[in-house]
Amino acid sequence: MSGWKKFGGTNKLELTNNLTVNSIVTDSLSLKKFYLGDWDICGGLRVKDNAIIYKDTDLCGNLIVGKDTTLLGEFSVSKDTNLYGNLVVLNDAYFSKNVYFDPFGNTLLNAVNGGFGFNKYDPLATIDISSDRVQTVYMKTSTIENRNIYAQCLLTIQWILMELVRLMPK
């Protein structure tokens, strides 16, 4: 017998379970079951369709996402994060430190123990404003009537009313 039938014919290749070679060159590779073990790729990896990863993924370089990203769990960042678009928060937002409104840290909001510090790190009052401008507070309204009360004490109002009643002609 000569030729390929001498070595078992086509059925011999189909029954082979293990293949040990130095390298494989192929135009196409299909895996019917999960690959068990580490797979080191020294080059790029492109996935044409969906990729599902069931365990942790460590990215040691940059991640570039070309379309939308949906996160279904918590998202933790241990270093600075730069956002070049709008930040839309549909629920509560919690800040443990300051909120800066310019890249130099000159305009800030600090909230500690029920006090709001505008350009002030440790507010001493409910609203504590620090400014280096001629006008610290400027308010404008488009309504005909405008009423502003900066501070009002209940005892002071009672005293003023008593004085007005006392001064009224009898």
Image (cartoon, helix red, strand yellow):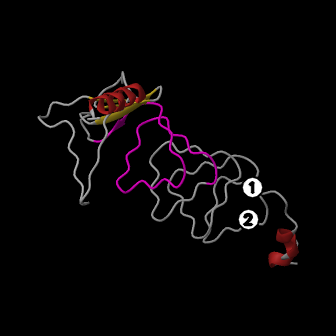
> Could you say where residue 94 lies in the image, as x and y percent from the top left?
51, 39
Instruction: Inspect the image, locate mark 2, and give the three-letter code of the amino acid beneath it.
Output: Leu
The image quadrant where one finds the N terminus is: bottom right
Q: Is residue 146 left or right of residue 90?
A: left
The tag on residue 35 is: 1
Q: Is residue 72 left or right of residue 64?
A: right
Task: Let me know if residue 126 is in the magenta part.
Answer: no
SS for dot 2:
loop
The image quadrant where one finds the C terminus is: top left
SS for dot 1:
loop
Name the residue at 30% across, 36% down: 150
Q: Is residue 155 left or right of residue 23?
A: left
**Is residue 17 placed above or below 161 in the rendered structure?**
below
Residue with the mark numbered 2: 31
Instruction: Inspect the image, locate mark 1, and give the three-letter code of the amino acid beneath it.
Output: Tyr
Crowding near the residue tagged with mark 2, few <14, some 14–19, many ≥20 C-alpha atoms within 10 Å:
few
